[in-house]
Amino acid sequence: MTTLIMNQLDVYNIYIYNWHNLLGFTVIAIIYSLVVKNYYFKFFAWTCILIVTTTAFIDYPTLLDVKTRNFNQFSYNASGFLTIILTLFYFYQLLQSLYVSNLTQYPLFWFSAGILFYYAGTLFSYLFIETTFNSSVELRQQYWVIDAILSIVLSIFLGISIWFIKPPDNFC
């Protein structure tokens, strides 16, 4: 019903999806910069935030125009690629330090695995989003099916990571 009303008003939700991509990457990069103790990694994470924000605002009408029908041309590719790099660096740091005794019960492992599956799975579809999404209805539906399946996988992994979060000792 909401989509029908918004469509009648010529307001589309693609600009919200564009903002979601930018804000989601920022949250992921901040989480990794807080968890990893390496100074160079922290610097790299904050540099990635700056890069993705800059690339998103190169195509600023897709962020600011509520009537846009276009995906942001640059931020999906940049954020997907840099998220994969950040996640792989985190896994490398995790294997180097060996401070986790049981990896399968570590919440950030499940979070990172879900992030890696989602962004690695959608990276190529985001590379060709402009040509596939706007070319035909069949390709658009296939894109959303792939994205929805990978979002479900991400949600399952995030659920597992929440399951393994321990409450504080003074929690009643």
Image: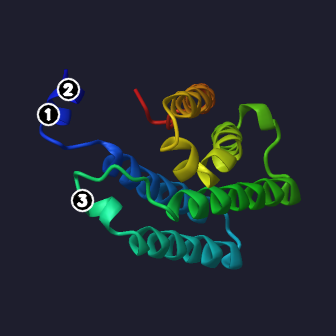
Q: Position of residue 19 (x, y in %)?
A: 37, 55
Asked whether the residues under the numbered discs 2 and 3 touch, taking CB atoms below 8 Å apart as contact, a structural biologist would say: no
Q: Position of residue 67 (x, y in %)?
A: 23, 51
Q: Earlier in the sequence, mark 1 or mark 3?
A: 1
Please identify the quadrant where the C terminus is shown: top left
Residue 83 seen: yes
According to the image, label 3 marks what residue?
A: 65
- What kind of residue is marked 2? Leu
Closest to the observer: 135 or 74? 135
The span from disc 1 to disc 3 (Cα, nearest Å) is: 16 Å
According to the image, label 2 marks what residue?
A: 4
According to the image, label 1 marks what residue?
A: 8
- Identify the element where label 1 is drawn: helix
Disc 2 packing (10 Å; few <14; some 14–19; many ≥20): few
Give the quadrant of residue 149: top right
Left or right of 171: which side holds 15?
A: left
- What kind of residue is marked 3? Asp
Asked whether the residues under the numbered discs 2 and 1 touch, taking CB atoms below 8 Å apart as contact, a structural biologist would say: yes
Q: Position of residue 159 (x, y in %)?
A: 56, 27
Residue drawn at x 70%, y 79% is 40
